[in-house]
Image (spheres, rainbow, N blue to C red):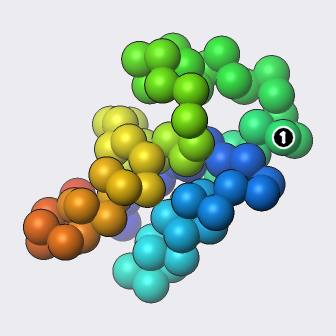
């Protein structure tokens, strides 16, 4: 199973949609909620190349991007290979 990390905020609808998509795929993840852990914002910025929006999703240490990027991978049929 893939190692998934998601940087989120509590009231972010795109974060919720990303988690629902991954849950539908039977995946688990480590969630880093920036509302609860604001000190990890710099870590997210460094890992994402300065991207400031959430969610920021990493699969096996590689940046996937946000929800739109995750949904695009799913629509293109490429998400399953990343999650394998």
The residue singled out by tag 1 in the image is 35
Q: Is residue 15 left or right of residue 2?
A: right
Q: Is residue 32 above or below residue 84?
A: above
In the image, 68: left or right of 56? left
Q: Looking at the image, which is closer to me, 7 or 30?
A: 7
Point 58% across, 42% down: residue: 54
From this viewpoint, is residue 60 visible? no
Q: How many marks?
A: 1
Q: Is residue 41 visible?
A: yes
Image position, residue 20 (x, y; %)? 53, 76
Q: State the quadrant of the N terminus.
A: bottom left
At x 80% / y 21%, what residue is drawn?
39
Q: Is residue 63 above or below residue 59?
A: above
Q: Image quadrant for the C terminus?
A: bottom left
Q: Image height check: is 8 above or below 46? A: below
Crowding near the residue tagged with mark 1, few <14, some 14–19, many ≥20 C-alpha atoms within 10 Å = few
Residue 34 on image: x %, y %: 76, 37
> In front here: 84 or 11?
11
Residue drawn at 56 percent across, 59 percent down:
14
Tell me which residue sits at (69%, 24%) in the image: 41
Give the image quarter of residue 44: top right
Please, what secondary structure does the residue beneath circle 1 have? loop
Q: Position of residue 82 (x, y in %)?
A: 23, 58
Spot the residue most to the right.
36
Q: Position of residue 43 (x, y in %)?
A: 61, 20
């Amino acid at each position: 199973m893939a190692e998934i990390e998601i940087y989120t905020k509590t009231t972010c609808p795109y974060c919720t949609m990303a988690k629902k998509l991954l849950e539908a795929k039977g995946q688990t993840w480590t969630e880093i909620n920036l509302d609860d852990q604001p000190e990890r914002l710099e870590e997210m910025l460094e890992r994402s190349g300065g991207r400031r929006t959430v969610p920021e999703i990493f699969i096996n240490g590689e940046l996937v991007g946000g929800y739109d990027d995750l949904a695009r991978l799913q629509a293109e049929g490429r998400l399953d290979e990343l999650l394998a």
